[in-house]
Image (cartoon, rainbow, N blue to C red):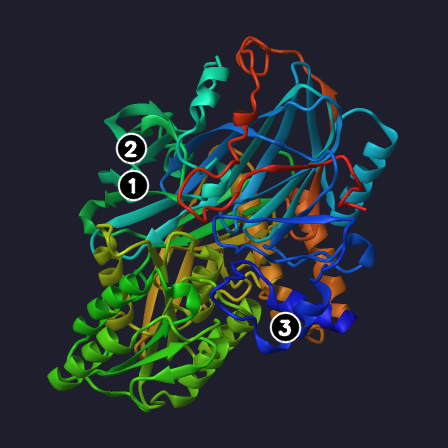
Amino acid sequence: MAHRWNRLDKIFAAGIVWDPEEPLPHELQDSVHGYYNFAGRSDVNLELFKLPGQYPEGVQVAHKDRELPSIPQPVQAAATWPGRHLLPPLSVTVDASIVQDTARVSVSQLFWNDSGVPIKEAAFTFPLPAGCTVTDFSCRIGTNKIIRGAVKPREEARDAFKQHIRTHETAAGLLEQDTPDIFTTTLGNVPEKTKVKVSLTYIAVLKHRFADSRNVTTLTLPTSIAPRFGEAPEEYNDAASTNVPQGLTLDIEIVESENITSVDSPSHAITVARRRGARDAESFADLAGEGNRSTVETASVKLETGHMFLDKDFVLDIVTAPDGGTENPQAWLEEHPTFANHKTLMLTLPPGFLARNAPPMQRSEILFLADRSGSMKDKIAALKSAMQFFLKGIPEGRKFNIWSFGSHYTYWQPQSVDYTEQTLNSALSWVANDLKANMGGTELLPAIQAIVDARDRALMTDVIILTDGQTWRMEQTMDYIQKTHGLTEGRIRFFALGIGKAVSHALVDGIAKAGGGYADVVQEASQGGWEDRVVSMAKAALMSAHLGPVHLAFNIQDENGNTRSSTLADAKRSPADTSAISPFDRSRLYFHLDRLNEAESIKSVKVEVQANHEIKTLVIPVTVLEKRDTTLHKLAARSMLNDLERGRSHIHLGPNRPVPGSLGETNMVRKEAEGLACKWSLVSKWTSFFLAEEPYTPTGEDAFMDGVVEIKVSPADDLLQPRGTPGDATNIHYALSEGPSGME
């Protein structure tokens, strides 16, 4: 039985969707049907709660007394025990500050426990941007209690939480990372008739879109941080005589050193207030000591209606124009405020920079791989529109082909063909007439393997995958793409275009990162603005140079002015393999430096890369930040943890690496990750926040929590009641269990 569950754990991963339109892979059907079946059981009522509208009705899960492993994330399930309640979310407030392409986001969520008894345990699952760095987490309970804590190894934090709620009546909390973009908060000992405010702050490096002479930075807020069921019922408005805003309230401040061309949301109606002038230092350049105040572009963004319920991800695009029309690389050095002689270097390479002025490709091959699984039924129009754009933009003289996949794979032509007017018309006709969502499940990996085997090995090859992200075997797929890109030294690249309202960014971004390509997401063909994204991806795939390995050397100077060149081979870094850098994303390379002589300093970084068979060399000066801080240190640590989780760390890639998948490898990775995450107070796959109750004195700044605002409760107060379009999924809730604990 154990080996079957190990196989399930490998196949279920971030971004996987169990869609009712698609069958399970054959090897899973017996396992799932055998262990997820409760026909005839009268002692338990099982209910599935779904995240971001992706997960289907009717999936049953094993009862806890079967002693099976927990259900692989992100499928979320909770038992409905007698007396179980839902803690209704009243409102969500998001405050975000964006400096260049780094966002600091604070999310506060208000809840009202209307039950008449204390709640022993409350579980709350929600997504955050993949790879973000959670820097602060707290929960205020009632008017005079707050829970705060520290990061511990995962099992140690769980044990501390369970021990606390068994032996104490005071509140406690646990914040865990289930997948790179799914987190769970568990609260213990929540008093009856109590208001709860959950506050979380994270730092995220934002998505950067490839575009000519302009930078497009995108902030995405997952829908599940807010109620998403349309207008509240009239009974709710009558009962809640309060100034607490319902739904989501949003306040975003943008600070840019470049000229802001536009700020727009393709997903929601917003208001934007822009201004230019001197303000306190906030950007990395300001912190470098170039004066305490600088002239920058700023903008303030709010929802047009003040607050609303969300039915899809909130997306904000910030377009800036760099001086001279091009963006240059930067290197920043941050010194830690308390750790002696500990520094972090962050090297930023803008998109397109490594391939800038590279000789153009004379001939190459482009292969499209379109998702035709059952889950694409409502997205097939967008898929066809994107394919038509791609096909019409292929330069003459290139070779191309179209593949598609579902439970199996097929192709338009057995081998790629030259791009001519005749072959273009034939391909367009095939897309219009044969591209249908009628191929069952989502088996992406076999299709990619077939494409790689069938490609023209004499040419550079670009593969563009178009999918809704609802796929199986993501981990194995990423591994194969990474190995293929590396073994061919960049001669084959993989791009991904996500289609739909609830695309897994972990999947599409993972394909691009592993395959040396570029990723983006479009929602619906009926919405404007998607053409620009498709054109940008087409240019990235069709017009950019294929890059070989990237090599770095650091120019180090001592107190006497003598210099030496070093690769800093002993420094912890991310990515561990800095040779495989994507030319399309803004690449960030981090180095933790604690072995340099205190009198030595890094003056510059030399970057050398092969682009279309020609060697390019550039030298980047290093700017030392005047203010000692931990921001770059924590971003570097988070990036290293991501490498450990993806199997791309120095442990996995080093010359003395352990046997892949062995117990030795697992133990080495766990020990490294626990030490790194605990040192820098980061929640990860291996570590969690454990929080215990502390006294709190109200400040009078929070009317809701300080008791100034009275909450009146009626049966209609539960914002989790479906009241949007049919099939909308419950995506944000507290699962409150007065029965047996799911932690046991």
Disc ID at residue 28: 3
Disc ID at residue 265: 1
Tell me the element at label 3.
Answer: helix
Residue 587, x across and y down, in percent: 41, 57
**Screen quadrant of the N terminus:** bottom right
Where residue 190 sits, quadrant-wise, is: top right
> What amino acid type should be assigned to the residue bearing mark 1?
Ser
Q: CA distance from mark 3 to mark 2?
A: 45 Å
Q: Sequence-wise, which precedes: disc 2 or disc 1?
A: 1
Q: Residue at x 44, y 79 (%)?
A: 448
Tell me the element at label 1.
Answer: loop
Residue 464, x across and y down, in percent: 34, 71
Answer whether labels 3 and 2 touch (C-beta < 8 Å).
Answer: no
Q: CA distance from mark 2 to mark 1?
A: 7 Å
Q: Which residue is mark 2?
A: 270
Is 518 above or below relative to 186?
A: below
Q: Residue at x 29, y 41 (%)?
A: 265
> What amino acid type should be assigned to the residue bearing mark 3?
Leu
Answer whether labels 2 and 1 touch (C-beta < 8 Å).
Answer: yes
Tell me the element at label 2.
Answer: strand
> What amino acid type should be assigned to the residue bearing mark 2?
Ile
Discs 3/2, front: 3
Q: CA distance from mark 1 to mark 3?
A: 40 Å
